Image (tube, coloured by chain):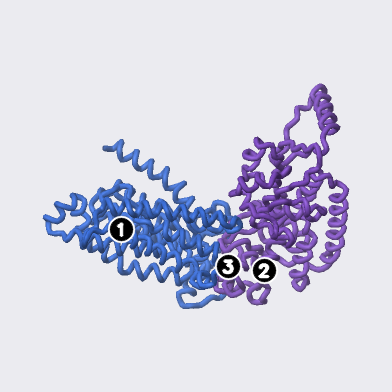
Amino acid sequence: MRTGSLAALGVVLLAALAVGSVAVAPGDVLGAILRGLQGQVEQASDVIVWQVRAPRVLLAAVTGAALALAGSAYQAVFRNPLADPYLLGAASGAGFGAAVTIVYGASVTWLATLGVPTVAFVTALVTVSLAVLMARVGGTLPTVSLILAGVVLGSSLSAGTSFVMLADQERTAGVLAWLLGSFAFANWRDVLVLVTILVLAIPAGLAARRAFDLMLVGEASAKQLGLPVERFKWLVVVIATLLTAAAVSVAGVIGFVGLVVPHAVRLAVGPEHRELIPLSILWGAAFLVLADLAARTVLAPAELPVGVVTSLVGGPFFLILLRRSRMRA
Amino acid sequence: MPCRPWFPVTLRSSLTWLLVLLFTHGLAQGTVTDDLGRDVTLDVPATRVVSMIPTHTEKVCAIGACDRLVGVDMFSNYPTEVQALPSLGSAFEADVEALVALDPDLVLTDEYSGLHDVLEPLGIAVYVGTPQTVVEVWEVTRDVATLLGLQGEAEALIRDAIARVDALSERVAMGASPSVFVELDPSPYSVGPQSYLGELLTLAGGANVVAAELGAFPLVDPEYIVAQDPDVLLLLDAPFGESADTVRARPGWRALSAVAEGAIIEFTQPQVDLLNRAGPRLPEALELLIDVLEEYRR
């Protein structure tokens, strides 16, 4: 399953590199990739494929991987099927920071200098940290308080985002487009930022597969079985928050991937994390690459916000999957 | 305008409608149909006017009735004298109490603001409508002028504006059209040829790289823009931090000829207002576009 999924991801990546609003012959696509890997850009199609399309495709892949990994980790640690990477307020925090930067960047120079991704990353981290501080009792993180603090902080910040959006109607569409997610101006630096965090997070996630399984039986039992539950929760929250904040800051708030991909994997291979974690990473990457491919080709050369595609297409797809598995059971 | 009432065209109903029209027009000083298809009637010309969108403010002043304005929205900043008037928030978040306290006899606003639902039960006449095309600028100007009893002024203004537009278009009659990408914001949202700004661009002799099928305000795939390689980039988002530098830093955009030639126009906020507001300063907006495109017309 893992090898098959990895191969499928490879095919999806190649397809997404080959297809776009500008038609490029397959030979030119291959040539652009080969030349690009050597740092060369020769013809017009090289610019399209290597400089515009390739970072976009790869950023969608690493963002999908990051969100699905964070989502599957949260669903295990919080033992909550509705948990997603945005549960503790990362998305609302990032959204608020982005909205403030987009709307007030004109008059507040330091905001514009920092730029939307940096501000969004910082506000996401600050929001989750606040939720953790609110919920913390001594060295422990009671799960219910943590979720409540995250949800409440998130609602307040979403209200703040709406307020900021309406304060300048000329910028409303821009803020909304950011909130719905976009890979339009993806660049290699963004890809590198996420790859760096994933290089740390993926081995950690794979190493913790047994611990995630233990968490599923309940915190008390997990403790009896020798898992340092509190320390583990802290670690998961820190890593998942870094992943989510980085993903949201470069791609906007793309819903659904972190919630539904782990469930889809679970329906396919069951709840054990030995398969769940690696497959979530691979499927999350493939799903978001396909969603972005749809976003930029369905109405080409106009675009759909990728977050709209993930929810519109992913929702019904998931429901069908759910129905099928229930009928089999 | 998009919304017109639908009249059943039988002979009898036509006669009835004719009578209704004659009757209402005979009685009232001015009746106009607004963008929601509502008839707005004033028995005497409005003397205390509130404008909740900048284009209406500019229209009222352009037909010489600036002194009848008693309040404006927070975005109305032209002509400068309106900045001294009470500011009533935005059309979508209006300070209704302050607005009513000004005792207006006419409120001009946007069709989606919902203000008419609030104000008409209070006996305040409300005209809703935002011009979306060049033709609608003249239509809405006529409507507003009718409610102010200044039809003659409006006709003179429109005649003069159309004459200026005609004179300006002679400047662009010669030379090949440069291809142009208009950037409204860095998402990037742009304008189609059927939008007001798209129409102005065509009149100014620019060839929009965004095709009409994409709609009036499409979100455009950046790789399409790179492939189109427009001669000129018009940054209406320059007041919000976009510039020739940020454009050059975008992946793959360094290869654009507009970037290589430095054909990137960074508009200022007053210029963006001028271009975005479909109103009486249309000839000035057109002239600005013609001026910036001048050197790229080969």
* Contact, mark 1 vs mark 2 (Cβ under 8 Å): no
| Chain painted in purple in the figure | B
Chain bearing tag 2 is B
Residue A105 placed where, x, y %?
54, 67
Amino acid bearing label 2? Thr
Residue B122 placed where, x, y %?
66, 37
The residue depicted at 16 percent of the width and 59 percent of the height is A227
Chain bearing tag 1 is A
Chain bearing tag 3 is A
Amino acid bearing label 1? Met
User: Which label sits on residue B224?
Assistant: none
* Contact, mark 2 vs mark 3 (Cβ under 8 Å): no
Marks 1 and 2: same chain? Answer: no
Front disc: 1 or 2: 1
Residue A301 placed where, x, y %?
59, 57
The residue depicted at 54 percent of the width and 56 percent of the height is A165
Residue placed under numbered mark 2 in the picture: B268
Q: CA distance from mark 1 to mark 3?
A: 34 Å
The residue depicted at 85 percent of the width and 30 percent of the height is B22
Q: CA distance from mark 1 to mark 2?
A: 45 Å
User: Which label sits on residue A134?
Assistant: 1
The residue depicted at 35 percent of the width and 60 percent of the height is A128
Q: Colour of chain A?
A: blue
Residue placed under numbered mark 3 in the picture: A106
